[in-house]
Image: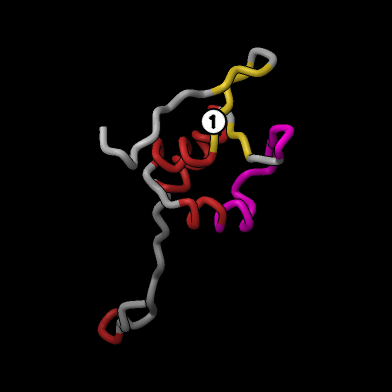
Amino acid sequence: MSQYEVYLMPRKINGQLYYKTSEVCQKVGISRATLFRWLREGILNTVYTDRRGWRLFTEGDLSKIHAEVNRIEVKHHSHPDKYTGD
């Protein structure tokens, strides 16, 4: 394990496991900036925080974030020969 990796140690609160932001990012392979952008865009309906105001994520949240990581959009262009690469 490198010095930059974090140990995944979810917290158990009232019988529910919660992950910190850094743990979520490592587990699904995205940056904090990407996670925060997706949160602003509303991929999660509910955001949990601890008493310090730090975000906490459930296994269900991880599933939704992982689904976003693996989401593929299909865009159709009317003129394939004039595709601009956007």
- Between 12 and 80, the one lying in front of the other is 12
The magenta-colored residue range is: 37-52
Which residue is found at the position 56% from the left and 53% from the top?
A: 36
The answer to which of 17 and 62 lies nearer the viewer is 17
Q: Residue furthest top?
A: 15
Residue 25, image quadrant:
top left
Task: Give the residue number, with chain letter if any, for mark 1.
Answer: 19
Task: Look at the image and tell me in which quarter the C terminus lies.
Answer: bottom left
The residue located at (68%, 43%) in the rendering is 45
Q: Nearer the viewer, residue 86 or 29?
A: 29
Query: Residue at position x 61%, y 34% from top?
Result: 56
How many badges with numbers are in the image? 1
- Where residue 19 sits: x, y (%)? 54, 30
**Residue 17 position by quadrant:** top right
The answer to whether residue 24 is magenta is no
| Pointer 1 local density, CA inside 10 Å: few below 14, some 14–19, many at least 20 | many
Q: What residue type is labelled 1?
A: Tyr
SS for tag 1? strand
What colour scheme was applied to this rendering of the protein? secondary structure
Image x and y of residue 77, in percent: 38, 76
Identify the residue at horizontal 64%, vertical 13% (top origin): 15
Residue furthest right in the image: 51
Is residue 45 covered in magenta?
A: yes
Where residue 85 sits, quadrant-wise, is: bottom left
